[in-house]
Image: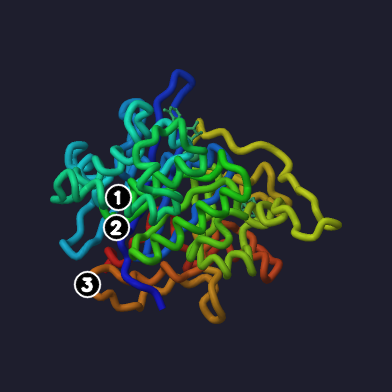
Amino acid sequence: MHGETVLRVRDLSVQFDSIDGTVHAVNNVSFDLKRGETLGIVGESGSGKSVSMMSLVRLIAEPPGKITSGSAMFITSDGEVDLLSLSRRQLSRLRGDRIGFIFQDPMSSLNPLMSVGAQIAESVRKHTQLQRAAAKTRAIELLEHVGIPGAKQRYDNYPHQFSGGMRQRVMIAIAISCNPDILIADEPTTALDVTVQAQIADLTNRLCKELSISVIWISHDLGVVAGLADQLMVMYGGTVVEYGEVEQVYAHPRHPYTIGLLGALPKLSKTEERLVNIAGAPPSLFSPPTQCPFADRCPWVFERCESERPALYDVGGEGRAGVVRSDDATDGRGSSDGWVDSHLTACFYDLERNRRRDADEPVAVRPGALAHEEQG
Ligand SMILES: Nc1ncnc2c1ncn2[C@@H]1O[C@H](COP(=O)(O)OP(=O)(O)O)[C@@H](O)[C@H]1O
Ligand code: SF4
Ligand SMILES: [Mg+2]
């Protein structure tokens, strides 16, 4: 049973002008984020994970960046608004207030000349009505909340006196200090050692579940998002290649790239330990995606893959293969538009049946045409 949608992104495309030509960084990306749930976004470096999320809140440089299509409905009890239609000024108010961030490098977000406690208190004051003393008390509570021992004493420490993991805890404290609706975590644990990674991931997950904050957790490592995410979105070459419930995607990966990623997960048993690399290089983003972006690396490639870009097909449960459900009633707040609990993949080859999909199959969803609730 799924909750309400808090963020509904459809058909998002982002390009960059560069001296070498136009970079098609993000192409027709669509997804739903449910209240209190975690969406994991995985894909190798350069697949468009950061640009797609940053462009939602206009944290990309424009120019050279440009959002060329899409909508991003942010749905709260106050109503819904298309983030892409807001001014930079309106968005800057939403950032930090309703949409929090944690990035890979906390040092770049923390002020080295200000104590960590004062930085949390400042954020608290900015986003609440609390006065100075109350904000300090709240900041100490938040430090305790994110597991900093001796929070009261550590309040006056500077960022350089904290370890990488503790600095990331401070960033989490700042991000949740205003109780946002959404937390976007962009590879926040990548620079940390494995044990600390797991602790930070668990902490974020636990706090966000407690506070009903929806999380978008970006990682190049499928293993990291495994235990965290409710839904998983796999990106490749600036496109969504697979999307679904995390258990479903793990148990039944349907895109050759996802299968490759799963193969690349280190096996738990020592004797089985191996890293299977997917041969080949990611696609050039200089030409528009008019073919399957994975064609050059795919073991199943056939002619059609090189002349047409695959739509997203629903490969979900029994009796649903190939059909994106459109019969779900919405509750007026966009809690269901019929595909969020689908398992979608952008591949012309039906790996389950070991056959090519019918070229005339009418039920595939064209990239960018996912917002079928708008089609009446
Ligand atoms: N300012 C920019 N100018 C040109 N290309 C850019 C710019 N920012 C990002 N890109 C390109 O967009 C693509 C997606 O980048 P990104 O979203 O950062 O990847 P990921 O987060 O998945 O590693 C990359 O090919 C990157 O080179
Ligand atoms: S569409 Fe073709 S090339 Fe692309 S992943 Fe599927 S089988 Fe491979
Ligand atoms: Mg990135």
Residue 213, located in which quarter of the rendered image? bottom left
The crowd level at tag 1 (other Cα within 10 Å; few <14, some 14-19, many 20+) is: many
Q: Is residue 309 left or right of residue 5?
A: right
Residue for point 52% across, 70% down: 322
Q: Quadrant of the C terminus?
A: bottom left
Q: Nearer the viewer, residue 128 or 324?
A: 128
Q: Is residue 12 above or below residue 208?
A: above
Residue for point 55% across, 77% down: 317
Q: CA distance from mark 1 to mark 2?
A: 6 Å
Q: Are marks 1 and 2 in contact (CB under 8 Å)?
A: yes
The amino acid on which the numbered mark 1 sits, given as a three-letter code, is Ile
Question: Which structural element holds mark 1?
Answer: strand
Residue 47 spot, x, y in % from top left? 53, 41
Q: Quadrant of the N terminus?
A: bottom left
Q: Which residue is mark 3?
A: 332
Q: Nearer the viewer, residue 320 or 277?
A: 277
Residue 28 spot, x, y in % from top left? 41, 49
Q: Which residue is mark 1?
A: 99
Colouring = rainbow
Within 8 Å of ligand 1, the CB of disc 3? no
Q: Which residue is mark 2?
A: 181
Frontmost of labels 1 and 3 is 1
Reading the chain from its start, which is encountered first: label 1 or label 3? 1
